[in-house]
Image: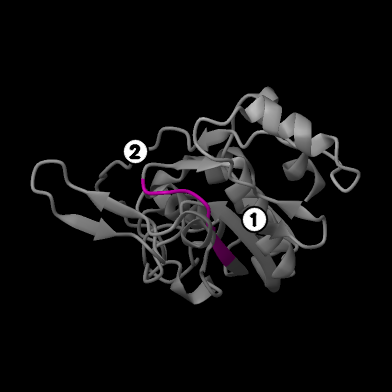
Amino acid sequence: RLISKDQGIYLLRIPARTSLLQSMSQLEKSASVAYAEPNPSFKLPGFQTMQTASVVRPNDPNYGLQWNMKSSGVDQAWALSTGNKNLKIAVIDSGVDPNHPDLIEHLEKFEDVWNEEKGPDVYRNPLSGLTKNYGGMDGNGHGTHVTGVIAAQMNNQIGVAGVSGEGVRIVPIKATDYAGNTDAAVLTAAFQRAIDRNVRVINISIGGPANKSTQALVDV
């Protein structure tokens, strides 16, 4: 599968019971192959939401809970600027709630790279057997949370205020499943999609050991 046309990066699947090391060694003997490497897996950090009582403050009712805005000086920065509505930021994460009332005004077209690379993001309840397809949405919550930190609408009397205040454009790029799992090939494709969408900033909150990175991720 072609991941990046610009960099000539492909994802190859080898047959079951085939040696990965031998396959990579054979590929690297080809004059048309710059490098061959494994496709390691990654995972979002642990994430939990907390239900808290509303604290009414001017405009955004839960702004009183955002102690970090004062401690980091964001409230002072707002005196200079409350955002740039022409600035596009890609959030590579678990997706976003496309109908969230505090985010919807800032969302660009949803890019479901996970579905393109891995197929449907379906959760199956182990007890009831019922399923939920999280295609085109956030089944984890982490991506919606991160998008809110950046771009929750300010001064709309809903929820909280994002760091960007009153304006940026968010390109949500779904690159994990509902459990937060992903791999280097999906992330590489997600970065390429962000580049193709001409974003100025890429936010990614996924991490792992340095030895699990790939040259493809570096190249893209």
Label 2 and label 1: CA atoms lie apart by 27 Å
| Place of residue 216 in the rendered image (x, y in percent of width and height, measured from the top left) | 75, 44
Residue closer to the observer: 105 or 174: 174
> Residue at the location (84% across, 44% down)?
33
Q: Closer to the camera, 7 or 132?
A: 7
Residue of label 2: 48
Decide if residue 143 is on the left or right side of residue 21: left
Seen from the viewer's position, the closer of residues 140 and 118 is 118
182 or 142, nearer to the observer: 182
Is residue 73 visible from the viewing direction of this image?
yes
**Mark 1 secondary-structure assignment:** helix
Looking at the rendered structure, the kind of residue marked 2 is Gln
The answer to whether 129 appears left or right of 158 in the picture is left
Q: Indicate the colouring scheme.
A: one colour
Q: Which percent across, then down, holds residue 189?
A: 64, 55
Whole-percent x, y for residue 105 in the image: 49, 76
Q: Amino acid at mark 1?
A: Ala
Which residue is drawn at the image coordinates 53% and 72% (left, top)?
106
Residue at the spot 31% in from the left edge and 55% down from the top edge: 122
- Which of the 4 quarters of the picture holds residue 52? top left
> What stretch of residues is rendered in magenta?
171-178
Q: Is residue 54 visible?
A: no
Q: Which mark is residue 189?
A: 1
Is residue 23 covered in magenta?
no
> Where is residue 9 shown, x and y percent of the image?
75, 52
Q: Earlier in the sequence, mark 2 or mark 1?
A: 2
> Mark 2 Cα within 10 Å, few/some/many (few <14, many 20+)?
few
Horizontal placement of 70 versus 89: left or right?
Answer: left
Of tags 2 and 1, the one toward the viewer is 1
